Amino acid sequence: MCGPVITIRTQRSLVVIYLIINRSNFDLTTNMAAPTREGTANDVLDVRQFLEGWAGLVGNSQLQKHEDDDQEAKIANDMSISREMVEELASVCSTDTLLCGSEPEEGNLTAFPEVNLLTVRCQEESVQKRENDNIFRTKVSRKMRYKYVQTLAPPCQSEGSIECPIKIPEVLLNVKIFRPLYSKKKQTFLDQEFQVIGSNTLTDLRDKYSCVADFSVPGEFSEDPDMPQDNRAKDLFKSGFFFIEGTFYNDMRYDDCRDYSKVIIDWAKEKERGLGPYTSAKMETTRFVDLKLRLGQPYVYLHQGECEHLVVFSDLRLHGADDPQDAKAYPLLVHKSKPRRQLCIACQTMTARWIVHGSPLAPEDPSHFCDVCFKMLHYDKNKKKLVEFKAFPFLDKTAVF
């Protein structure tokens, strides 16, 4: 089943890769794709050379966390002033001095002060209008820049809770994975962002990243919608690859994994294509410190035969004392999108469980239905189909993540 899929989808994969090779007009260092000028991505960086070069300049002592350090004494020594002066500066520059005594109590920020300021009056009117007008509240919500992205706090780790301390020096990369890119739209959105260390393998990132396509149930269930849905796509189709700087990194950990890149490499070898040469390597044996990459350059992650994600390395730096010190915490999820719930097209209340194709009873083709509406509309009391159609299980992202 997986072989024909990858053969059919090869042309679209190559279109994406061809765009990447020609540095298409994507700016994926932000949450949304947008036109940008030539040369957005950096030059190729060797991660290992970056680590060795900067670690030698900085020194391990500055990268490690010392709990017993006297910070005030360090500041006094660096600034060539007395400790008393440092304490006085800390008191004068404290955030407590920013308070005026009339701030609203915590948790009651909508209690506006009784002052005759135009800005306060406008904000108060806006809050009241949002409470009374659902349409206006929706319009305001759509204009919020980061409403679809959730920032996650790093894990709190005490010295005794660290199971596998990171070996200093270490490198830290920020990796952004975007939602699947469709050929009809030149716009894609950030799905999840991770921090990885140089000792992580590419399979560590793949296993940490959650895509709804991996949890979907393959198969057509219109004849018996009550059939058990035990087989997940990630358990059946385990193949996948990262395409980074001309190399396909294939996941070959299991016996039934297939080399997705072979058909693409063979296709690119044809002289009229003018592409390549490309190479392949194993994802499970490749660490991030072994990569050569460009910051800001979109790469490709492909899995499930046709699910394509753009991948962008947005930052590269040394792992510092303020970063989580446990190696098992990485890859660390730092941002994730806030998915919208797919409602049933009939009741507009329940989350969709089925996607129906070719049904004359549905208002659209395809249509999403919840379990109750799907069965009431398409089956009689004996659970027999009323019309011909095809039904596939639909897994809403909000129900998984």
Image: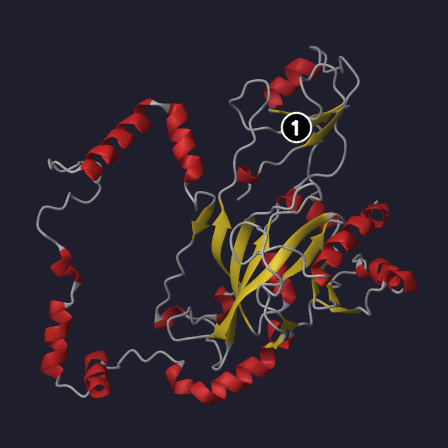
Q: Nearer the viewer, residue 58 or 24?
A: 24
**Taking 290 as reference, is 258 left or right?**
right
Indicate the position of residue 363 as horizontal and vertical percent values.
67, 17
Total marks in image = 1
Q: Which colour scheme is used?
A: secondary structure
Toward the top, the furthest residue is 381
x 66%, y 42%: residue: 185
Indicate the position of residue 186 as horizontal and vertical percent values.
65, 46
Q: In this view, does 117 lie above or below 180?
A: above
x 44%, y 49%: residue: 150
x 15%, y 43%: residue: 104
Toward the right, the furthest residue is 271
Toward the front, the furthest residue is 37
The image quadrant where one finds the N terminus is: top right
- What's the amino acid at mark 1? Trp
- Disc 1 crowd rating (10 Å Cα; few below 14, some 14-19, many 20+) is many
Indicate the position of residue 323 as horizontal and vertical percent values.
41, 70
Q: Within the image, what quadrant is residue 52 found in?
A: bottom right
Q: Which of 187 and 215 is in front in this view?
A: 187
Indicate the position of residue 232 as horizontal and vertical percent values.
69, 44
Q: Within the image, what quadrant is residue 224 found in?
A: top right
Q: Is residue 344 above or below residue 208?
A: above
**Taking 45 as reference, is 85 left or right?**
left
x 68%, y 61%: residue: 23
**Taking 137 as reference, is 109 left or right?**
left
Q: In this view, does 180 lie above or below 196?
A: above
Q: Within the image, what quadrant is residue 203 found in?
A: bottom right
**Taking 307 as reference, is 147 left or right?**
left
Q: What element carries label 1?
A: strand
Q: Circle 1 sits on which residue?
A: 354
